[in-house]
Image (cartoon, rainbow, N blue to C red):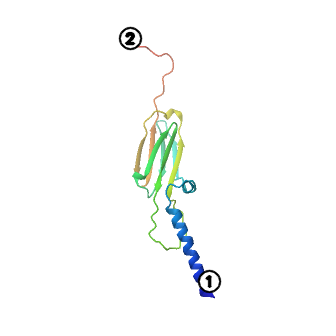
Amino acid sequence: MGDALRAKSRSFEEEIRGLYSEFSQMKNGVMLNALNVWHPPTDVCETEDEFVITCELAGIRKEDIRIQLLDDVVQISGTRIEKRPIARAIFHNLEINYGPFERNIRFPKRFLGAEPRASFNEGVLCVKIPASPPHPKGKVEIEVE
């Protein structure tokens, strides 16, 4: 009886692993994306001269990162591809997020219109938006041609 129970248990375990494997390999599924979008740790600061976003993206290739400006929001998104070499393993701890990620950071209006710069070094993305020059107030001089 013990052997039969162990065989059923192993069969059930293999079925669950197969389902998990199929589910985790799905691409662009609406439900999968909704469930698996993760948010990388991000620091945001503002100085007199610039708005700085620092995002920890260890294990992600530069080619897999997208940065977009949407009005007064910087959207950082991409995918960390899962690389688990051990097919049949018992995991004791799973803390690393895989799959699609996204961060949306709103920035102050005084940075609108400036050209952002981005760098990526040792798994850390840094996006800097310089402050736009202040618009002069008061009278506007008209030049005669």
Q: Residue 83, can we see it?
A: yes
x%, y% of residue 136? 48, 22
Tell me the kind of residue under disc 2: Val
Q: Which mark is residue 5?
A: 1
Q: Is the C terminus in the top left, top right, bottom left or bottom right quadrant?
A: top left
- For the residue pair 109 and 98, the one nearer the viewer reads as 98
Q: Amino acid at mark 1?
A: Leu
Marks 1 and 2 sit apart, C-alpha to C-alpha, by 95 Å
Most distant residue in the right direction:
1
Pointer 2 residue: 144
Q: Nearer the viewer, mark 1 or mark 2?
A: 1
Viewer-proximal residue among 37 and 19: 19
The residue nearer to you, when weighing 91 against 54, is: 91
Query: Which of the 4 quarters of the picture holds residue 67?
Result: top left
Disc 1 crowd, CA 10 A, few/some/many (<14, 14-19, 20+): few
Whether residue 119 is situated above or below residue 94 in the rendered picture: above
Q: Is residue 136 above or below residue 114?
A: above
Q: Residue at x 51, y 67 (%)?
A: 21
Q: Residue at x 45, y 39 (%)?
A: 129
Instruction: Give above or below for 140 relative to 69.
Output: above
CA neighbours of label 2 inside 10 A, class few (<14), some (14 to 19), many (20+):
few
Position in image of residue 76 (x %, y %): 48, 47
Instruction: Give the quadrant of the N terminus.
Output: bottom right
